[in-house]
Amino acid sequence: MLRIRTLVIATSLALGACSQSSEPADKATPAPASTAPAAPSSASTTAATPMTENPFYAKSTLPFEAPPFDKIKDADFQPAIEEGMKRHLAEVEAIANQADAPTFDNTLVALEKSGVLLSRVQHVFGALTGANTNDTLQKVEEEEAPKLAAHSDAIYLNDKLFKRIETLYNQRDTLKLDPESARLLEYYYKDFVHAGARLSEADKTKLKDINKEESTLSTQFTNRLLAATKAGALVVDDKAKLDGLDTADIEAAAGAAKDRKLDGKWVIALQNTTQQPNLQALNDRDTREKLFKASWDRAEHGDANDTRELVSRIAQLRAERAKLLGFPNYAAWTLDDQMAKTPEVAEKFMERLVPAAVARATLEAKDIQDVIDKEKGGFQAQAWDWDHYAEKVRKAKYDLDEAQIKPYFELNSVLQNGVFYAANQLYGLTFKERKDIPVYHPDVHVYEVFDKDGSSIALFYTDYFKRDNKGGGAWMDNFVTQSKLFGTKPVIYNVANFSKPADGQPALLSFDDVVTMFHEFGHGLHGIFASQQYPSLSGTSTARDFVEFPSQFNEHWASDPKVFANYAKHYKTGEPMPKELVEKIKKAKSFNQGYAMSELISAALLDMQWHMLPAGGEKKNVDAFESEALKKAGFTMAQVPPRYRSSYFQHIWGNGYAAGYYAYLWTQMLDADAFQWFTEHGGLTRDNGQIFRDKILSRGNTIELGKLYRDFRGKEPSIEPMLKDRGLK
């Protein structure tokens, strides 16, 4: 998943997991801890230094302007954010109020150069509040969220500034701009209009109030959900109740209990999705039910962590905003600048997938019930039974056991010999670990990225292990954005939530975890290969229903025979995975895809239903609305719940994917169609990689995205490869 930021003010928003595989949850062992100094940010409350000594005051002197985490303290963020907004607004006012007639340079280039301090601190603040937060940072986040919303409005709703942009836009055919500059002008004009620049002063005041309240509530949602997820962890008193988990999982649960001062107990932490990975292995049905319900109800206990009131109000505010901006609903406003263009197009696209997904899931449910009946279970399958018995079906149908394959997927081998190897074979990249660059946590590692000619082009950080103070899921973002205007190269990071095993245990991943690593690195490549003049158009700064395309496309290389053989080796012996086991994995590729697609589509349609509400209605009862929305979408199988419930749908309430979760399905169409092109042209070759880099990965948002894809593929994308790839046709 990509983390979305508002480009003008560089405000980062954390997002949940984007991989279409299961949420990362199996054990993973870190590489040896980096010797680079770690920041005290997650614990330090030292008083803020004077601004001239604040580590964000000037650009970093580290390679690539990497953040100086060894110098950054919690107390540095708020004064830097406040000063950053102050300076940025002064710069914007100077641009808007200058006497000279507007030119591309004195208006748009000047805007691109503004807000440097704010951007610098927000990149780091967004990273830590997502991956390594604490009470101090959360307090700063809640205090600054409405101020940042007001700051954004002060720019977007500045009438003098917009008139300068509008003047240039009306003159665009005579300005003789190069293509990227012309795209920047179009981007700014549409972005300002979309944000309300044409509203009356009275309506601008209303919009500011809405934006301020929504930003406050969205931040509260994120923080409540993090607390609810931590508090919702299942505490087990009897080790016998953990029957089915392997030794390393049990030791990890004991370690988690010890961390919470619950000696003699075991704690299973919750992942961010509805289904929980340990449901597959747990033999005790009562424990499975408790774990599932702990996940399902995590944010619905009527306590301080309950998110439902926030959800209702956020939906109401968004509908009001859309009406104010001249749209029938929030989804229509959101999709206006996306590839799909309208919610009706997105819904129609998803509705084409529903019958096949539900029909496949129904057959899968029958297979599961047959196993239960054969074992004389005496019960009808429920949601907490699905993964457990689906694994038994997989063993019976394909003779494939998850425990058989995990020893061949050790994390460091997957990274070095899989993810990095594929990037080398396709694009000529090489990677070297840097232990001299400070990190924000000992689990974080830093790699310098070298191009095929040996030139140094980027830094890449990894942070793969779950912590109680880390948001759920997996994502990518930048510490530094590539820009020729600033002379900056990309500094990228990937975050995941693989369970950290007990000390000394190997990093054995599920194949879903492996796919997650390839996915997030696909986002990384999109950022690493950025080659834009302007930061607002750089790298991953594209529409939501395009940005997941490079990441989902990169998932395909996890299964490529050449790549797979290079990383799938036994962690003890170094022996490659036996051919018969490889064949079993291939044959099982479409296994359980009815369930996987159904949980994804139902979540996407739930998101769309929330954001197609008209303005003026009463706040909705969250549970009742959710139930009716799923029924309307055609999902009535209790055994197949949505991937996210409304009350813990972080993507849409806290992290920028509102009315945009369909993007994961839309970009599955793009990625499967693009991979079909690779298949037609010889697969994993350097020549093919160069074409994909030149036509997709390096182009950022410098061209209309539909045309960008057509220029690569030679035609419009087809849904057929997606249906075949997912086993639905």
Image (cartoon, rainbow, N blue to C red):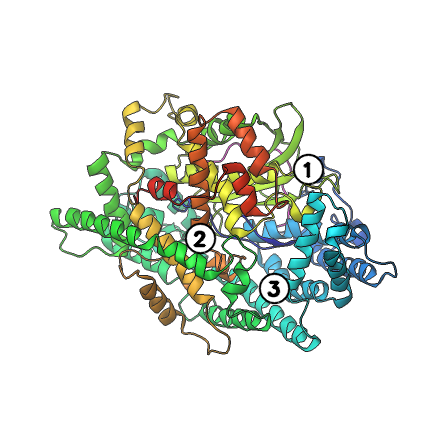
Give the mark nearest the N terminus, 1 or 2.
Answer: 2
Q: Picture coordinates of residue 579 (x, y %)?
A: 30, 23
- Which quadrant holds the C terminus? top left
**Residue type beneath disc 2:** Lys
**Bounds of the magenta span?**
29-41
| Residue that appears at 65% across and 75% down | 203
Mark 1 and mark 2: Cα distance apart in space:
44 Å
Disc 2, SS: loop
Give the residue at the far front of this rendering: 174
Q: Nearer the viewer, residue 588 or 479?
A: 588
Give the mark nearest the N terminus, 3 or 2.
Answer: 3
Q: Nearer the viewer, residue 254 or 132?
A: 132
Residue at mark 1? 489
Q: Residues within 10 Å of mark 3 (few under 14, many from 20)?
A: some
**Residue type beneath disc 1:** Lys
Residue at mark 2? 261
Q: How many marks?
A: 3
Disc 1, SS: loop
Res. 445 visible in picture: no
Q: Picture coordinates of residue 677 (x, y %)?
A: 45, 33
Residue at mark 3? 142
**Would you place residue 340 above or below residue 163 in this image?**
above
